[in-house]
Amino acid sequence: MKSAEPTRLRVSVVYLRPDLAFERTLLLPAPATLREAIEASEVRHQVPELAGAELEVGVFSQRRTLADLLHDGDRVEIYRPLTIDPKEARRLRVAVRRRRREGRAAAA
């Protein structure tokens, strides 16, 4: 026997940055989209930088579109834009390590 689809979905909406952790658990009527969950969470009102922004979103670390349907228990994640190119960040880390190594070698 096939289980019935839930009439309400329990989902959470999260947005993180170094100084803020926004998480809201919601009960939404099924079917619901990521866009509807974000609107119901009111995260755009609580976090000013999201107010007019085009959002990059996902569910459990998997990129999704705002039109995708949710499942009971999903965690909607709003992603921040990268502040630095990953390749540039790696170059900077390598340069710091080299300077540390050279400093230790000179002190020895």
Image (spheres, rainbow, N blue to C red):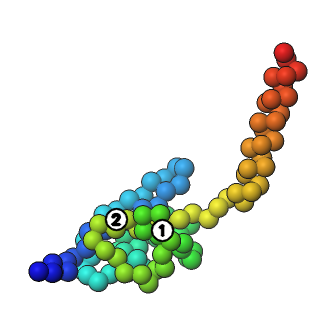
Quadrant of the snapshot with the C terminus: top right
Residue at 73% from the left image edge and 50% from the top image edge: 90
- Number of numbered labels in the structure image: 2
Quadrant of the snapshot with the N terminus: bottom left
Quarter of the image for residue 38 reads bottom left
User: Which element type, helix, strand or loop, lies under badge 2?
Assistant: strand
108 horizontally vs 55: left or right: right
Residue at 83% from the left image edge and 33% from the top image edge: 99
x and y, in percent, of residue 101 in the image: 80, 29
The image shows residue 47, relative to residue 98, as above or below, that is: below
Visible residue check, residue 34: yes
x and y, in percent, of residue 106 in the image: 88, 21
Residue at the front extreme, as displayed? 1
User: Which element type, helix, strand or loop, lies under badge 1?
Assistant: strand
Residue at 53% from the left image edge and 55% from the top image edge: 17
Visible residue check, residue 46: no
The residue tagged 2 is 12
Quarter of the image for residue 43 reads bottom left
Task: Tell me the amino acid under the disc marked 1.
Answer: Gln
